[in-house]
Image (spheres, rainbow, N blue to C red):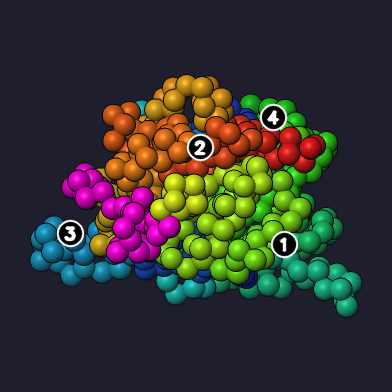
Amino acid sequence: MKTKFIFVTGGVLSSLGKGLAAASLGALLQARGLSVTIQKLDPYINVDPGTMNPFQHGEVFVTDDGAETDLDLGHYERYLDVPMSHKNNTTSGAIYNRVIAKERHGDYLGGTVQVIPHITDEIKAKVLSLAEGDDAPDVAIIEIGGTVGDIEGLPFLEAIRQLRSDLGRDNCLNIHLTLVPYLKAAGEHKTKPTQHSVKELLSIGIQPDIILCRCEQQIPEEMKRKIALFCNVDQDAVFCSVDVENIYQVPLKFYEEGFDQKVAIMLRLPARNAHLDDWEKLVHDCATPTGKVSIAIVGKYVDLKEAYKSLHEALVHGGIANRVDVELKYVNSEEVTEKNVAENLKGCQGILVPGGFGYRGVEGKIEAIRYAREHNIPFFGICLGMQCAVIEFARNVAGMADANSEEFNPLSAHKVIYLMTEWFDFRTQAVEKRDAGSDKGGTLRLGAYPCKVQPKTKAFAAYQREMVQERHRHRYEFNNAYKDVLGEKGLVFSGTAPDESLVEIVELPNHPWFVGCQFHPEFKSRPMKAHPLFRDFIAAAKAFAKK
Ligand code: GLN
């Protein structure tokens, strides 16, 4: 097997940035000429995060193959620029689901099915699946969700403990990320939480090879030596992950520390010198904008920024491509009314309505869209945002006062957005291909589908291509029965499925930039390669700011 494995665990607390650390290490190894993939193992019982409330769990990241995954996969794709798939994420729920299905099928031949070995074997198989095939990567980084000491994480830790003896020391590396707090009153960094966390890890049989310390400021060398001594790792195997202003600085910071070099040496990787020009240029461009634009995100989950993680990043990428700082203003759509809409959106050069589910906050989104349309403010509607733009146009331009989506009012006389029943069979098949589905998830259109872009439109100006692939996660569609009447009133259908059965992009020609898309372009945006629609949206906002 050519693939070598790096296991990343976390201790002390959650939200230490394990995902970013894994992604940044991956980017550095890639810059050293190695092929890399990253997998996230999530200990929760949901089969996938698709059914979880974004308020609790943050964004659901959708892959090309239609897997609904953890938002860390978004970081992986953005840092590696390699597409993730259902192979790159699993959960306790999915693992148990598989084992129980096999048990029902009689695969265990009368045996007692247990956590060890059956659950752990299933986890190991999922990890090892990354090393299969001709295109197996040189390195697979496995991030274990949660914190060492969590009851639900134990089978995953046991599985990686076993993998090390299965595959040998040269092929596996354990990295433990902990917190090293700085106590202002004492005037020093504290290593005790790290020692306790490593002790916990040792008690389940895992000796970390490298300790990565999340800290507010650089830790002194003697402190690193102390951690090395107490935690039983090489003197030069303790690294800092210092707080940064911009997350795209992390790979360069790690490089300065010599983190990737130590990893390459310990795993005996055939690594060349790192080529980091792209990352340096990126960080330089981020730090030296030539202007600023304010973008209002009018949505429901404004209290938890993680719920719009990819969106937020895609807007930042659009800013980098246009050399402007993008200031995001999160506006709670539930509070937007016809009376206060101007006040709420004051000072913004662009308005974005993101995806979402359910009626709550929809009328506020429609008000914001009307405001953007009537005041020629650049507007970008994504998924539900596009559906709301169609509703707004039908109501206020085409005079269908009760126009709505079937999702919000099944009794509306003008269901301009509706459930397209003939797609059900097709969707169900797509979903059956996934690890497992739920009834709720089962009716969603998920993953990448082709979209044909009409020439001489804003969408075409952005893509410069007639055929594109974009990722979807929705249940409702534009109702083709309204194509003619809304078209006559000036709505342009600039993107459709190749056979024209589904509307994918709508826009207004007599507006500086008013575009809505049924798919989620934010999932495919990269820091060094902004998504064309985000790039052009920010360019329009920049032009609006100049005026
Ligand atoms: N609720 C809408 C639908 O199901 C939009 C979904 C979304 O924005 N992701 O079609």
* Mark earlier in primary sequence (4, 3): 3
* Residue appearing at x 69%, y 59% in the figure: 342
Residue hosting label 2: 507
What residue is disc 3 on? Answer: 102
Near-viewer residue (129 or 425): 425
Are circles 1 and 3 on residues that touch, CB within 8 Å? no
Query: In the depicted view, which residue is nearer to us: 355 or 495?
Result: 495
Residue hosting label 1: 343
Q: CA distance from mark 2 to mark 1?
A: 25 Å
- Discs 1, 4 touching: Cβ within 8 Å: no
Residue 434 picture location, percent across and down:
28, 49
For the record, the magenta segment spans: 401-429
Name the residue tied to disc 4.
278
Q: Is residue 366 visible?
A: yes
Disc 3 is placed on an element classified as helix
Q: Earlier in the sequence, mark 1 or mark 4?
A: 4
